Image: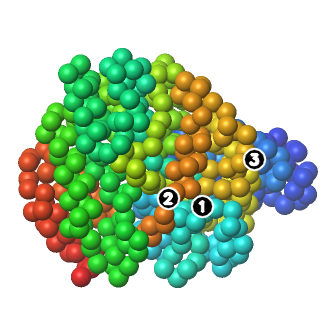
Amino acid sequence: MKIKNIVLCGAMALGAISGVNAAEHEIRFDGFPDFDSSLKVILPDFEKQTNIHVDYLMNNHGDHHTKLTTNLATGSGAGDVIVVDVEKIGPFVASGGLVNLSEKYNADQYQSLFAPYAWAQGKGADGGMYGIPVDLGPGVMYYRNDIFEKYGIDAKAAIKDWDSYIAAGEKLKKNNIQLIASAADVAQAIIYTTVPEGEGLYFDKDGKSVVTSERFVKAFTVAKKIRDKGLDGRILAWSNEWYEGFRNGTFATQLSGAWLLGHLNNWIAPETKGKWRVSHLPDGIYGSWGGSFLSIPKQSTKQDDAWALIKYMTTNRDIQLKSFAKIAAFPSNITTYDDPLFQQGVEFLGGQKARLVFAEVAKNIKPVKPAKGDHVARSIILENALMEVLDEGKDIKTALAEAERLIKRRTRSH
């Protein structure tokens, strides 16, 4: 756990606040890396403008959300501003522990500034806004350009469809290079990006499970083909082996969100600068891969100051662009997309104008409404059923049918 404090000169703060206890203007921001890199850049100006001091507490992604689940359930221990990953926004909103920002701060007046699909994800069943999108995760494929060139693989041809992606993998395998860290990432890409209109990720508009549908069968089938042909490294994301794979060129592609660029460049594999490029996802699919929201827990006693920080980080065009430049957190604020920054080459990606790729993907993502049971369904599908198919050779339709029964039982849906 890492706690970071940024404090203004006490005398200056007290003078500006004129008699109000300075402690009343201190708030805490709870998040996960690489938000700390971004906050270092943007907070000094915010503090100067507002006289609101911001402490921040960073935990790794999983621990952060586990802690927040407990904080919201018990009504204590959460920061004043919390970061919520897109995968958790549905259940966190449904928990009842977050402030309705539409009701309290008329947040809907800012709706036109944001990507429509992300705005929809931050809403509750009552139509109120509970999480303001702070960054998006346009889905892309990162690939090792040096490896592709060495073995005569054309990136555009490789992403034409899943068969051509697999064919590229077979060429790489002959040279002892894996196509991707884990075949599971391919299944996740298909599940996340081919949602029919009116459906959620795992449930239809009436809350009925859709996990035995063709979308899931296809996702599992393509992933199994990659595993059966020995084209993936069976490497879990966010493991030491994963980091080493990026550094050593163990695998040649990774499907992820725009935000991975910040991690690769800032700490995972800075020494591979210039070797990577990005492309669209294979098979002509567009989709979101991650994304974050800022919310205020009801338990916060500094809600007005918390809202001031959320507004600053999301509605302020320049601040969104600063975060984008620092940690590749793709702006949720669509007024940024005509900025010259998008035309600049990205040094880590060999000078490629990658932000234009991210922007094109972001503009083509369709809204997918989150559901209360998403996190339950996700763990059953991606962590249990998919692994049984990939690791144990379980029949795909059997695994999905069993997963659906479990989802119904765990979410009491019918």
Q: Are marks 1 and 3 in contact (CB under 8 Å)?
A: no
Q: Are marks 1 and 2 in contact (CB under 8 Å)?
A: yes
Which residue does the numbered mark 3 point to in the structure image?
318
Q: Position of residue 29 (x, y in %)?
A: 61, 52
The amino acid pointed to by label 3 is Asp
Calculate the distance from the C-alpha at mark 1 to the C-alpha at mark 3: 17 Å
Instruction: From the viewer's side, name the closer residue of 92 and 76.
Output: 92
- Label 3 Cα crowd, 10 Å radius (few <14 / some 14-19 / many 20+): some
Residue 284 appears in view: yes
Q: Position of residue 351 (x, y in %)?
A: 59, 26
- The residue that appears at 74% across and 54% down in the rendered structure is 316
Which residue does the numbered mark 2 point to in the structure image?
365
Give the quarter of the figure containing the C terminus.
Answer: bottom left
Instruction: State the SS at label 3.
Output: helix
- The residue that appears at 58% across and 77% down in the rendered structure is 128
The amino acid pointed to by label 2 is Ile
